[in-house]
Image (cartoon, grey):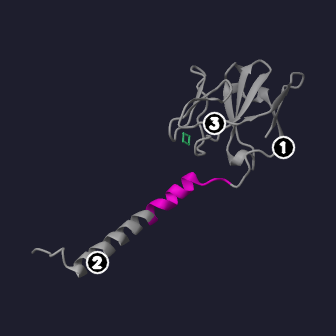
Amino acid sequence: MEYDNSSPERRNFLIRAGTLIGLGIAAATIPGLITSCQQNDNPISTNVKKEIDVTQYSELQNDFGAVKIKFDNMNGNMPVIVIRKSAGNYLALTSRCSHQGCEVGIPNSATHTITCPCHGSVYSEVNGSVISGPASQSLKQFPTSFDSATNILTITI
Ligand code: FES
């Protein structure tokens, strides 16, 4: 059986059917995209001081060891990456990628890089700067201070 696609009724039917199929696919796909790209209402920086005892983290006992620590309702509900650069010298970075907000991975202590799994941006573990894009801005750094008498690292998030 052959259809005459030149008839206006048939053409309109095909257009409507295509539109409905397209809308169905979009409806099924868009919620997932919205969820994965959704920006968090939680501000990335609230100027709140958080303290950690660095002796409680085995990852922070060696230079360029790093750990992700999540503080409730801080940093957009994403972990803060704490990196020991040397004894008493720590760096705290957001784990939120500056490209589209995915959570970056834990630093690679061999290459001193931090990679975002979403689109492959690579940052320096030394200071959070961009090594390769698509990200164009560094990972945000949070100010830190370290008390060597108590081993308490204070991070201003
Ligand atoms: S969100 Fe990290 S590279 Fe795109």
Mark 1 touching mark 2, by CB under 8 A?
no
Q: Nearer the viewer, residue 132 or 75?
A: 132
Quarter where residue 143 is shown: top right
Pick the quarter of the image with the N terminus: bottom left
30 drawn magenta: yes
Please report the residue visible at 61 percent of the width from the left and 32 percent of the height from the top. Answer: 106
Q: Amino acid at mark 1?
A: Val
The span picked out in magenta is 27-40
Spatial CA distance of label 3 from label 1 is: 23 Å
Badge 3 marks a residue whose secondary structure is: loop
**Mark 1 crowdedness (10 Å alpha carbons): few <14, some 14-19, many ≥20:** few
Quarter where residue 140 is shown: top right
**How many labels were placed on the picture?**
3
For the view shown, which residue lies furthest in the bottom direction?
9
Pick the quarter of the image with the C terminus: top right
Q: Which mark is residue 137?
A: 3
Quarter where residue 26 is shown: bottom left
Secondary structure character of the magenta stretch overall? helix
Q: Amino acid at mark 3?
A: Gln
Label 2 belongs to which residue? 12
Badge 2 marks a residue whose secondary structure is: helix
Label 1 belongs to which residue? 48
x, y (%) of residue 92? 73, 32
86 drawn magenta: no
